[in-house]
Image (tube, helix red, strand yellow):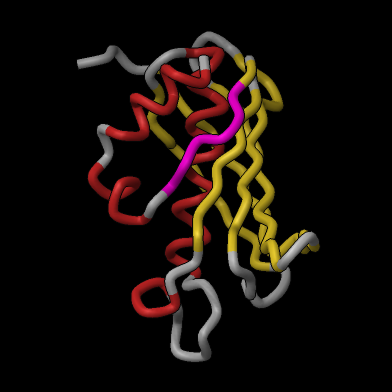
Amino acid sequence: MLDTLKQINSTSAFNRWAGFEVTRAERGEVELTLAFRPVDMAQYAGFLHAGMIGALLDTACGFAAGTVAGTVLASHFSVNCLAPAVGEVFVARGQVVKAGKKQVFARAELFAQSGDQLKLVATGEAILVPVDAR
């Protein structure tokens, strides 16, 4: 499963540019990491940009859903920014809450890592729909 998600991740130009790495994958669960690049990922105050936060959470939810439902697209997505996203590395953990035939409900948490410390900085939820693969 991990190798499959790594291959899928490598096909996304955005994920390659951003540097998303799939570090763990099990049925209904995934973990992604992102090394922070202040030059092109920071907002005006130097924190990880909310667009990148959303992208990490969306991808974690989508990949988690994909482990149980195949190819999926988000039909709804929400983000809660809880604290300034300050860290050297960001870790997104996604998991399926409930998988049905027509919808998959997933949630994700984003942690900022500095040294050995992890701090929860954002959460997200998504409703994903299975689609035919191209």
The residue under the point 45% across, 89% down is: 44
The residue segment tinted magenta is: 20-25
Residue furthest left as drawn: 134
x and y percent of residue 124 in the render?
A: 62, 50
- Residue that lies at the very extreme toward the top in this rendered image: 101
Q: Quadrant of residue 74?
A: top left
Q: Quadrant of residue 40?
A: bottom left
Q: Is residue 7 magenta?
A: no
Give how far across and how far down residue 86 sits, in percent.
63, 75
Please determine whether, in this image, residue 9 is positioned above or below residue 70. Answer: below
Magenta span has 23? yes
- What predominant SS class does the magenta segment belong to? strand
Is residue 19 positioned above or below 129 on the image? below
Please report the residue visible at 25 percent of the width from the left and 32 percent of the height from the top.
11
Q: Could you say which quadrant of the image residue 68 lies in?
A: top right
View extreme (front): residue: 115
Q: How many marks?
A: 0
Q: Is residue 64 shown above or below 53?
A: above
Q: Residue at x 62, y 33 (%)?
A: 106
- For the residue pair 11 and 127, the one nearer the viewer reads as 11
In the picture provided, is 2 more to the left or to the right than 14? right
Residue at figure coordinates x 48%, y 33% from the top left: 62
The C terminus: image quadrant:
top left
Horizontally, is 21 left or right of 12 in the view? right
Q: Indicate the position of residue 41 as horizontal and vertical percent values.
A: 41, 72
**Residue closer to the observer: 123 or 12:** 12
